[in-house]
Amino acid sequence: MKFYRQIYFVVSMITTLIATRMTAQSIEQTKQGVQFSAQNLDVKIEFYSNNIVRVYKTPQGVSYNKKSLSVVKLPENTTVSFEQKGNTTVLKSNSIQVDVNPVTGGISFYDNSGKLLLKDKDYGTQFSALDDAGMPSYTIRAGFLLDKEEPVYGVGQIMDNKFNRRNSSHHMQNENMSTYSPYFMSVKGYGVFWDNYSISDFNDNPQELSFQGIGHCSDYYFMYGKNADGVIAQVRDLTGKAPMLPLWAYGFFQSKERYTTQDESLDVLKKYRALKVPLDVIIQDWRYWPEFHKTDSLWNSQSFDKERFPNPKKWADEIHKLNAKLLIVTWPGFGPKTEQRKEFDSKNMIIKFDTWPPKSGARPYDVYNPEALDIYWRYLNKGIFSYIGNDGWWLDSTEPDHINKKDSDFLLPTHLGTYRSVKNAFSMMHNKGIATNQRLTNDNKRVVILTRSGFIGQQRYGSNTWSGDVASSWEMLEKQIPAALNYTLMGIPNWNSDIGGFFAGRWKKDGGNNNPEFQELYVRWMQFGTFCPMMRSHGTDLPREIWNFGERGSWCFDAQEKAINLRYKLLPYIYSTSWDVSHNNGTFMRPLIMDFANDSKTHEIGNEYLFGRSLLVAPVTQYKARNWQVYLPQGSDWYNFWTNEYYKGGQSVATETAIDKVPLYVKAGSIIPFGPEVQFSTEKKWDNLEIRIYPGADGEFLLYEDENDNYNYEKGIYSTITFKWNDKEKKLTIEDREGRFPSMLKSRKFKIAIANRNDVIADSSPKSGKLISYNGKKIVVKF
């Protein structure tokens, strides 16, 4: 028996040595990763940074040079250690450990403490040969293993009223009201972006989470950030920062489908000014262009009808004289009689399917062709931007709309392959062409784009995605919130919706704008819009201007005005948050998991969120609701914004919510600046700001200021003032001002107000405060 045991031991040792040698031969170390072949796949793993790992797979022996549309980051020099543990190759940076099994192709990701984060499955990637309209291609499937109860988020803006994306399936095809990217984020502090633009599928079940799409490679990036903020920072590092929008873009926008003449929209603006209701932006929707024999053959000609818009330059100038801004709609499709269409047709730069409107013959241009993007801008610039000096763009139908749909349409060629293989990036490419060309044309005006779709990477173009042509209903209002939160967790910070919902015809038979339920729905939606990155009223069937709901003194008018005025009072807070978004990779709409992931109750809460880092918003989404349950997360104490009532975190609170008040709480330790009452964002300087402090924890706030527009902030032309609250000592320190810009206030006054938890008030205004003078030098205020 002893002899046989010795033979067995020798054989085992030889087998292990052979296996180890085979492994060593089959896996090749590169500068910041490894490459190997397994399961008939060639696999490359490369550290892009300490926190980002790229995994790139192709069929064995079939090379493919991938050029990403989303990813802008190049691999940075990263110290990576290599170790062999049996059959496993271990790669480590300062933040991530990656274990590679070159036999099964399995890849496991750990944090630097050895905690398992995610598994790329053994044998989990599949390539199935596909004839993609004559081009050899593949249907590709990538499978991952997650913990059984691990919540994940992202995937897209999905109107199903769900927040956690576990145990769900989604056909990822960007269309009106549905905006996807192949991405998910885990509550464990990591994210995965599968860099593929095709019509795809996401599926999660108890066996695996998978992506499936069309292409030539499986290409994904594993990003570790420790928490949601960290993951979003990695997404922005990988796919581009979000630039600042101008201050006016955080004011109130008014629109409808549509203002038919230049005088109509100008009169709307004049009436807002006469009523002294704040407004910053008027939007011009479709058909400002001429018609051709009462048809839409000139659809999107990017020119003005001479009868209805006889002097568009004067029109834009008049809007500017009234201290407002103008957004103009432009579409990706062109009617057959337009000069743009003729040129695109002659250069084979049209994707030959029908787009909106019906019976027009309109078709979309090939946004994947760089030359086509420049041609598009040439017409847009000549016909509108450099002609009338508008301030931003409404890019409608950026999925794009697809009518008279045929299966063969998806096999149509584009500059980068079949339409189905790149469809989901259409909006990003269209936005790219306009944003980059506008900056080349005029770098003194920040790009502002309102767009109906999106994809990861689009955040770098000054784009704000709206949720599409949603119905005017309570159910749809409720669905907006988790849809917005999952969208923003993809690293794209700017999102909004049509206040009141787009299609409102259902309310016509019951009195339209005078219907009490529609009025209440509109008010509640406006309260939600107050705490979105863009606050914009728009819709069809019923007009949305404030006076259509009654006169001042009526509950519906007054509740709207109160919401709009609150938005403008919060502009210093919002604009400083915009700087946090741009400079620190922050987020406007923050799901509770971003700040309170340790409270497991937040993992499923998608109907409330933090706006910025201090304000907890719980929009009311039911008719006649005057009492609303709000969960206050554990990890902070909270103040009712309207009453100063003080609550411990970790509990649900029944909140009285009159029709003119959205449930709103402030995190203890918050410092919030409030601006003056204004009719437009830049009417008054911020020389007398009110600084409210909510005690109960130490706090800090950075007040950001610049020239309100242009890109000089990228050159360091801005200033910041840091406020620090020491809760134990009841002491506020206002630090030295940092930086400067030409129109900066040299001296100013601050009214410092302390929220007193025992001083319950009737509204949000504090009873008293200390008035101090500040000239840019550090001062300390004790209470």
Image (cartoon, rainbow, N blue to C red):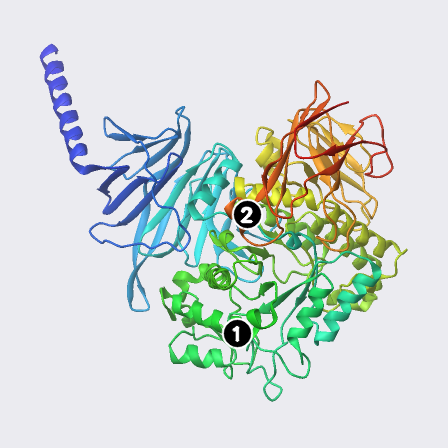
The residue beneath circle 2 is 713
Q: Earlier in the sequence, mark 1 or mark 2?
A: 1
Question: Visible in this render: residue 270?
Answer: yes
Q: Farthest residue to the right: give it.
A: 553
Q: Residue at x 49, y 50 (%)?
A: 169
Image position, residue 591 (x, y; %): 61, 40
Residue that extends furthest to the top in the rendered view of this protein = 2
* Left or right side of 494 for 752: right
Residue 545 vertical position relative to residue 729 in the rendered view, above or below: below
- The front one of 423 and 696 is 696
Quadrant for residue 503, please give it: bottom right
Choose between 731 and 132: the one closer to the eye: 731
The relative height of residue 74 versus residue 593 in the rendered view (above or below) is below
Please name the amino acid that badge 2 sits on.
Tyr
Which residue corresponds to mark 1?
382
State the CA–CA distance, disc 1 to disc 2. Answer: 28 Å
Q: Please name whichever residue, 404 or 384, is drawn nearer the observer in this view of the structure.
A: 384
CA neighbours of label 2 inside 10 A, class few (<14), some (14 to 19), many (20+): some
> Which numbered mark, 1 or 2, is in the foreground of this view?
2
Q: Residue at x 45, y 59 (%)?
A: 425
Mark 2 falls on what kind of element?
helix
**Image location (x, y in percent) of residue 372:** 42, 70
Q: Nearer the viewer, residue 652 or 370?
A: 370
Image x and y of residue 430, in percent: 48, 63
Does the residue at mark 1 contact the one at mark 2 (Cβ under 8 Å)? no
338 versus 248 height, above or below: below
- The residue type indicated by label 1 comes to Lys
Q: Which quadrant would the N terminus be assigned to in this image?
A: top left
Residue 491 vertical placement versus 434 (above, below): above
Question: Is 493 left or right of 476, judged from the image as shown?
Answer: left
- Label 1: which secondary element: helix
